[in-house]
Structure formats: structure tokens, C-alpha cells
Amino acid sequence: MKKIIILISALLFSSFSAFAAEEHASAAIEHAGAALTEGKHGNVGVLAEHATQAVKHAEKAVEVAKGPSKAHLESGVKHLHEAIKLANAGHGAKADQHLETAIEHLKTGNK
């Protein structure tokens, strides 16, 4: 009986982990997309704000992700950080490039 309870608990936990990763990755993609839209309009300050929110969600997704998904989410986080750094330095076009790459990685990691 104990083994069954442990098995059920493990299955529920892994299902919840996958759901949590997907939910946070989706939120990260949404914020990164908003950041990219703002960047294309020249609003680097708002770009940085959205990218910062994207990082928070992406990092939470990384915490519970596994395998290749985790690697893509981690790459997405790196590109988001670079986009924020470039936006804060006033380099909107370069920040946009990193956002586009981040979004690709986040989408791939969210499958």
C-alpha cells in the first residue's frame, strides 16, 4: 500500500512540475513578445521592464523543467539577460535580436 501511495504521489508531482514549467514558460514568452514589440517601437525602457518579467517566469520554468527543454529555457534566460543589458545601454536593435532568439528558445523549451 505504501508503494502505491508513493507511486501516485510521484506521478502527481511530475504532472504538476510539467504544468508549472509550461505555465511559466508561456508567461515568459508573452512578456518577451511584449518586450520585442516595445523594442520595435523604440521604447527601450519598457522593453527592459517586460524582459525582466520574462526572466522571472523563465527562471521559474527552468527550476522545474528537465532534459532538452531545460537547456532551451536556460538559453532563453541568457538571451533575455543580454537583451536587458543592451536595452539599458540604449541599444534597442541589438536587444531586439536577443529577444527574438530568446523567444525561439523559450518556445522550443515549452514543447
Image (cartoon, rainbow, N blue to C red):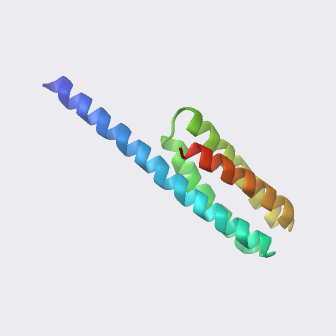
Q: The N terminus lies in which quarter of the figure?
A: top left
Q: Residue at x 79, y 61 (%)?
A: 96
* Residue placed most toward the observer, 7 or 33: 33
Q: Quadrant of residue 27?
A: bottom right
Residue 108 visible in the snapshot: yes
* Position of residue 17 measured from the top left corner of the image (x, y, whole percent): 41, 43
* Position of residue 43 measured from the top left corner of the image (x, y, whole percent): 77, 75
Residue 81 visible in the snapshot: no
Q: Residue at x 16, y 25 (%)?
A: 2
Q: Quadrant of residue 50?
A: bottom right
Q: Residue at x 58, y 52 (%)?
A: 58
- Left/right placement of residue 86 relative to residue 111 reads right
Compared to 91, does 82 lie above or below? above
* Position of residue 90 measured from the top left corner of the image (x, y, whole percent): 86, 68
Compared to 76, does 29 lie above or below? below
- Left/right placement of residue 63 relative to residue 41 reads left
Compared to 81, does 9 lie above or below? above
* Position of residue 36 measured from the top left corner of the image (x, y, whole percent): 72, 65
Q: Residue at x 26, y 35 (%)?
A: 9
